[in-house]
Image: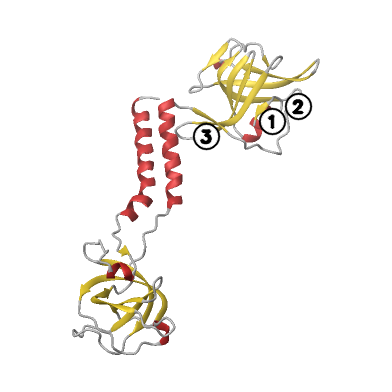
Amino acid sequence: MGGPGRALVVVLGGALLILAAVPIVVPLLDPQPQTAGVQEIFDGAITEPEGWVRLHGRVVPLDEPPTPDPQGPFALLVDAETPLRSIVVVTDAEADADTVVTGHLAPATVTVEEELPIEATVAGTPPRVVPDRVLLADPVAHPERTIVWPLAIPPAVLGILLLIGVRTGYPVFRPTKEVDVLAGPLNPGERLPAAYGGRIGPNRSDLADPDAALLLVRRGPRGNLLTAQPLPEGGGVAPAPVTIGGGWTSGRLGYVFTVTESVPALAVRSELVDATFLFARVAERDRVAALITVER
């Protein structure tokens, strides 16, 4: 393949790889708050430039303002992993035993003097509250980044196959283990039309522009023999059939892929034949394959 066709396949393969990158790249563009614990706020370990954090814990509404600035409503978030650490949150959320809160840290002078409910303590011991920060909660907690990897697999595989095909040259043969279990071998006297690329006796054909062939079965002294007969263009005299077998024979089931389609195929290697046969249906391919030894 060359010229415009090759360029088109390269563009299509590149576009598929770009499409495969979308489910990965787009989530990476979504800014995320720093996932932290309340102890990290005590330690000054928040590195997010705007103090945007994600905390996990228990939300307990407060009845009295814990700061001189009445910017409430206020609640106390008790850290899920370290329940003896907590931070005041500016939020109107109801009490929740297990929640995720995102928001921005803001400086404040914090003093919690009211008696806390038992669920906000550890066996009656109240948690230590961050004394110089409050958390201005987002109206809705920002969701964690999710990368849907499976969506990237189909376009990535297709794009890679197209680019490999351009590199190695179309058509491309790919083996398969898929067989039609209902297909029985050809019987003596049966004939099956096919196309071929490669060598049948002295006759040669290019797989990119295959010629017609006729596969037929005849009786031999030791059983049925599969033969291949190239068919000349224009209806001339056909050469004699060539026996597939008679010494060593091997075959591989698969498909031949072109830019626009895939065709059931059987690659045959023997003393007189070194060709890839193309069939209209999988069952036809497998009826021929049943007469020779194929690799699994």
Question: Type of residue at label 3?
Answer: Ser
On residue 262, the disc is 3
Where 16 falls versus 173 (above or below)?
below
Nearer-N-terminus badge (2/3): 2
Question: Type of residue at label 2?
Answer: Asn
Q: Which residue is mark 1?
A: 287
For label 2, the SS is loop
Number of the front mark, 1 or 2:
1
Q: Which residue is mark 2?
A: 187
From the viewer's side, name the closer residue of 59 and 286.
59
Give residue 96's quadrant in the image: bottom left
For label 1, the SS is helix
Q: Image point 50% across, 19% down: which residue?
A: 206
Nearer-N-terminus badge (1/2): 2
Question: Mark 2 touching mark 3, by CB under 8 A?
Answer: no
On screen, residue 282 versus residue 54, left or right, reads right
On residue 98, the disc is none
Picture coordinates of residue 133, whole percent (x, y): 23, 75
On screen, residue 46 versus residue 232, left or right, reads left
Give residue 13's quadrant in the image: top left
Nearer-N-terminus badge (3/1): 3
For label 3, the SS is strand
Picture coordinates of residue 73, whole percent (x, y): 27, 84
Number of the front mark, 2 or 3:
3
On screen, residue 41 versus residue 57, left or right, reads left
Question: Spatial distance from mark 3 to mark 1, Cα to Cα?
Answer: 19 Å
Q: Image point 54% across, 16% down: which residue?
A: 233
Q: Image point 64% across, 13% down: which residue?
A: 271
